[in-house]
Amino acid sequence: MGSIGYQTSKALAEILSPIMGKSEHHVINSKHLAEELSGVLVEEGEIFNSHDVVALFTNTPIQETMEIIRERLEEDTTLSNRTNLTASDIMGLLEFILTTTYFKFRGVIYRQRFGAAMGSPVSAIIAYLFMEWLEKKAIATAPLECKPRLWRRYVDDVLEIIKKDTTEQLTEHLNTVDTTGNIKFTYEEECDGKIPFLDTLIVRKEDGTVKLLVYRKKTHTDQYLNFDSQHPLHQKIGVIRTLLDRMHSIVTEDEDKKEEESRIEKAVTNCGYPKWAFDKAKQQVEGKAELVKSKGEQKNTTQETETKGMVVIPYVEGLSEKLQRIFRKHKISVAMKPHNTLKRLLVHPKDKVDTIKTSGVVYEIGCKGCDKSYIGETGRPFGVRLKEHQKDAEKSQTENTPEKIELYQLRN
């Protein structure tokens, strides 16, 4: 973020995103996975298995992926509807972005030599499109004895139904599809008829049918946003609502739903939530389900919630709620964000940019001989502009030299 190619990368991501998701094997999220597994029957002699790519982003073959994207763009009949750029223009920009992989760590500049850069908006799309191509080729060329009967993928995580004792053979095949040798798969077989995938625990029953549970890692602590935290009430209620929504979307059997609901209530109670907060969230989730069933009510609700715009304000307890009520009178929706957070106060993972190298600034240069000063603005590195001032001062043969420098970062 903040690199010279970040905004271009962001724009390219918007242009390229519509050509993703064309594969029938793609799953959007856990809810979609649950729908895909509904009615699936695992036959005798079959098991669930999952594969995962090792460090996909930084191992994605760039040149090969560029060719895949070029073909997709040339086949895309809707490209002109969302951009004035031609496929050739996009490929030129994309090549620049994918090869501009410089970063700074502890004062030393490095260049990532292969793969897509972590944090670049377009990297996820690059990796995703490569995986679509790879899975199509992998399934088509898989030997019959280890060909998956079911293949569902979320980015680089793949869930399969395969014959027993063919996992290693399938893994060897997958590791040969990418001719560059960068892409390597690891695998995990079901254990005791269970296998985790995304945040879902898939359980194979004795009759071959499948039931789904919410999956939590062994390190999971049930720690959520504490009720006493400085956040607006609707965000705290939203924590419970999200957990209940996940339960209804994933868990398939009523008995398991009751057990999951009990666990959620216990977890949020330990985080300081009162009973009325849980009941309110539960009522909202159940009300939403009823609303979806009635299309007429849904349309009326949409009309009632039309707004003129949105504002984002920092959350200050007591004050932000009053501002929200005022904005609502004018049909303006309000989003609140925490201001003083532990991350903001404690975490600074990136190297600080030297003041002299900062771009896009307003600066002040004081005069040595009097109390006046010069205030200027530049979009270039401040050090470059400062040297120009120094040269001008030398040419005019005055005694005025830059002495006091105050730098103010322009705000977007």
Image (spheres, rainbow, N blue to C red):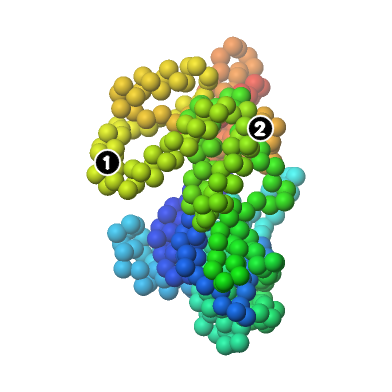
Label at residue 297: 1
At a point 64% along the width and 64% down the height, the residue shown is: 195
Label at residue 39: none
CA gap, disc 1 and disc 2: 36 Å
Q: Is residue 114 left or right of residue 310?
A: right
Q: Position of residue 9 (x, y in %)?
A: 50, 54
Q: As shown in the figure, which amino acid type bears the numbered disc 2?
A: Asn
Q: As shown in the figure, which amino acid type bears the numbered disc 1?
A: Glu
Which residue bears the numbered disc 2? 270
Q: Quadrant of residue 344?
A: top right
Residue nearest the viewer, comparing 184 with 235:
235
Q: Quadrant of residue 261?
A: top right
Q: Is residue 67 above or below residue 320?
A: below
Local SS, label 1: helix
Q: Earlier in the sequence, mark 1 or mark 2?
A: 2
Q: Position of residue 202 (x, y in %)?
A: 59, 62
Label 1: how many Cα within 10 Å (few below 14, some 14–19, many 20+):
few
Q: Position of residue 33 (x, y in %)?
A: 50, 61
Local SS, label 2: helix
At a point 48% along the width and 72% down the height, the residue shown is: 68
Q: Is residue 207 above or below residue 196?
A: below
